[in-house]
Image (cartoon, grey):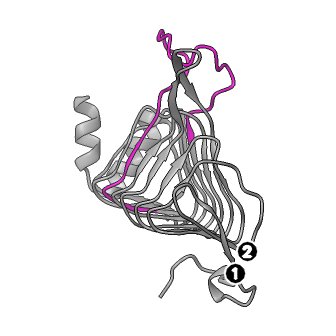
Amino acid sequence: MLVKIIVTLLPWPLKRWCLQRWFKYDIHPTARIGYSWIFPKKLTMHEGAKIGHFNAAIHLDYLSLSAYASISRGNWITGFPKNTNSYHFAHQTDRLPELYLGEHASITKNHHLDCTNKISIGRFTTVAGYQSQFLTHSVDVNENRQDSNPITIGEYTFIGTNAVILGGAVLPDFSVLGAKSLLNKAYTDEWMIYGGVPAKALQNIPKTAKYFTRSKGFVI
């Protein structure tokens, strides 16, 4: 614990050296981590990837940021690692407590990602606004036990502020999830706005919309 505290507070060049040498993380020379508590079992950060200040990423088996993916600040990313002595999730031998961000994907501020099971966020996706929740685990009342399911967020999607996304949900490529929506199932129709509680298909998106053809993640 003391070593992790010291590493977290170090200047970035020295921090990067320690994370690679002591924790065996794979961090590209152009990637960067701010003053954040980032200690999954395995970490990969590709070219230009960045994690800002005041984030936490713990109890994960793997955190992967593709090129130019970013996690801004104040986000809580946690999970439930495998190969423990706990009875929780013992029935799910194929469970993956992991988070993957595709190229130019972005998580903004003050979101909660429960990676008890795998969360995949596709290329050029924006988790916008504040206080969205990605919850991969819950209680199975029929079996009286903890259960989990992965969440899949497609490429070139936009998630509005304060949304809730539950295990098993899929947001297709080229789609939008409206603010304060509850996504609790797997959808397949692309070029669609989804919204509501629970979310449903609301309106087609024109294929001329420029957000869905950009070549850089940053939106001016």
The answer to whether 30 is drawn above or below residue 26 in the figure is: below
Magenta extent? 71-98
User: Looking at the rendered structure, which numbered label has been put on residue 191?
Assistant: 2
Identify the residue at image location x=50%, y=10%: 87
Image x and y of residue 1, in percent: 26, 28
Q: Is residue 195 left or right of residue 110?
A: right
Picture mark count = 2
At label 2, the amino acid type is Trp
Q: Residues within 10 Å of mark 2 (few under 14, many from 20)?
A: many
The answer to whether 22 is drawn above or below residue 10 in the figure is: above
Confirm whether the magenta stretch covers residue 218. no
Predominant SS along the magenta part = loop
The answer to whether 90 is drawn above or below residue 173 in the figure is: above
Identify the residue at image location x=47%, y=88%: 220
Instruction: Identify the mark nearer the N-term, 2 or 1.
Output: 2
Q: Residues within 10 Å of mark 1 (few under 14, many from 20)?
A: some
Structural distance between the alpha carbons of marks 2 and 1: 5 Å
Confirm whether the magenta stretch covers residue 85. yes
Image x and y of residue 51, in percent: 41, 58
Pointer 2 with pointer 1, Cβ within 8 A: yes
Image x and y of residue 171, in percent: 66, 58
Q: Under tag 1, what secondary structure?
A: loop
Identify the residue at image location x=27%, y=54%: 54
Q: Quadrant of residue 6?
A: top left
Q: Nearer the viewer, residue 40 or 166?
A: 166
User: Looking at the rendered structure, which numbered label has been put on residue 132?
Assistant: none
Q: Which residue is mark 1?
A: 205
Image x and y of residue 30, in percent: 49, 65
